[in-house]
Amino acid sequence: MRSLFRKILTTGRVAQPAPARASDQAADPGVLRGSVQIRHVDAGSCNGCELEIASAFGPVYDAERYGARLVASPRHADVLLVTGPVTRNMEDPLRKAFEATPAPKRVVAVGDCAHNCGVFAGGYGVVGTVGDIVPVDVEIRGCPPEPDVIVAALRDLTGR
Amino acid sequence: MTPGAMAGVLLQVVLLIAVAPYVVGVMRQVRARLEGRAGAGIGQPWRDLRKQLAKEAISPEGSSWVFTAAPVVLLASTLVIAAVGPFISTASPLDRVADLFAVVALLLLGTVALALAGLDTGTAFGGMGASREITVAALAEPTILLVGFALSARVDSSNLAAIVDRIQDNPAQVLSPASVLAAVALAVVVVAEAGRLPVDNPSTHLELTMIHEAMVLEYSGRDLATIELAAALRLTVLLGLWANLFLPWGVATSASPSALGIGAAVFVGKVAILAVALATAEVFMAKLRLFRVPELLAGSFLFGVLAVSSSFFLA
């Protein structure tokens, strides 16, 4: 316990200073202003995007300071963060998760695979892109997208 | 009931509702800072509530009125405690309702309503959360009752305001063995009832480790906002009760505006200090394995037994 206490004192704040927001504002966040709860749905990703999402919510990028928070249930969520090409076994769960989310809701497709199936395009287990199954509001490109790109997209949603 | 006294009750309820989400916000912020993060700010729970109230509430397929009623019962039972308890004043006109056993029963009513709602959803996690919550509640209730006996034995009344008044008159009693033992016992129970570490982790995403969260997985929108406000209010009420039973200074003994003002300010200060202390302690703790939780609660029961015996034999 003493070593943990010393670590807290010596480490201090590791969160990077908040970068300035891009001036070309996205659409008005509306109801979601200042508070966005996010349910992450892995529709068949290679886990590259998951690593980047985990570090976007880690201490260094700290997406939570902009009002975004990961939650455990789509019923609690405002935003579905979908990664990967949609595989056959995840097509139905993804649709159900979308239906379980209370309106108003947004779908954020993370990574190139969610956009065009990436290297998995044409695979026998792949049904299609995220946009083929549920309506996508925001796309975050990259393979995998860097944490600050994910954080910037989430800040457009919370408006903070 | 005089207008002044009614204003006191109203002030207490409004103050508790306004402060409760900030208590959760302060605890999250303290944790964020100790983890090296910047944190979302202490107002974040209020922003979450405002947004959830504007969203649609979905009832899962096959759920009954039990599911719809549970958030209301939970919030209402907590609001009754917030109205009658001696939080900012002991001169409340609802004083006679503020019986320690009535307050315990009201807390349990909310717990049971939520547990039934967890079962009503018919999901695996809802039922699992309900069974765990009731297990913890069944082990925590005897300790509360024993602490109640220990505190009420020397006042000859189980009225909360009477207990608070008596300790305010005799400050030396705060350091009496019965009071210290009861404080330790009740602290463990407060942590268990409020669903904090090491009994339950309020920020977990792993369904298998959930207790409170597992029961509310199916709630959304307005219903979720009701439950989150009630949970924050329960935490505030429990912290406030603990503070006023064992450190009762500053609680108003009359219904005059200045006394109520001081009482409100002191209450906010005490709850803030306790919330910061609890959040700091949580950083150093991991969640207990579920089968170790009964051992922790049995330990607090033992403290309760010792508190009762010392209040009889050493008083």
Image (cartoon, rainbow, N blue to C red):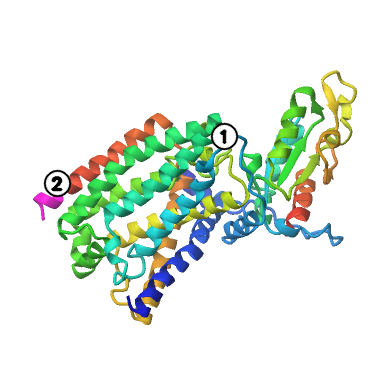
Does the magenta-highlighted stretch encompass residue B314? yes
Quickly name the residue at label 1.
Answer: B206
Q: Can see residue A22?
A: yes
Q: CA distance from mark 2 to mark 1?
A: 41 Å
Q: Amino acid at mark 1?
A: Leu
Measuring 79% from the left and 50% from the top, which residue is drawn there? Answer: A153
Q: From the image, which quarter does the N terminus of chain A lie in?
A: top left
Determine the secondary structure under disc 2.
helix
Find residue B12 and report its horizontal and vertical position in percent: 41, 68
Q: Is residue B171 above or below residue B177?
A: below
Query: Where residue B88 sits: x, y (%)?
Result: 36, 69
Q: Position of residue B196 (x, y in %)?
A: 45, 45
In the image, is residue B301 part of the stretch drawn in magenta? Answer: no
Callout 2 crowding tier (Cα within 10 Å): few <14, some 14–19, many ≥20: some
- N-terminal of the pair, mark 2 or mark 1, is 1
Q: Quadrant of the C terminus of chain A?
A: bottom right
Most foreground residue, B95 or B261: B95
Q: Which residues are magenta?
A: B310-315
Single out the residue that lies furthest toward the left: B313
**Residue that mark 2 sits on:** B309
Residue found at x 37% / y 58%? B81
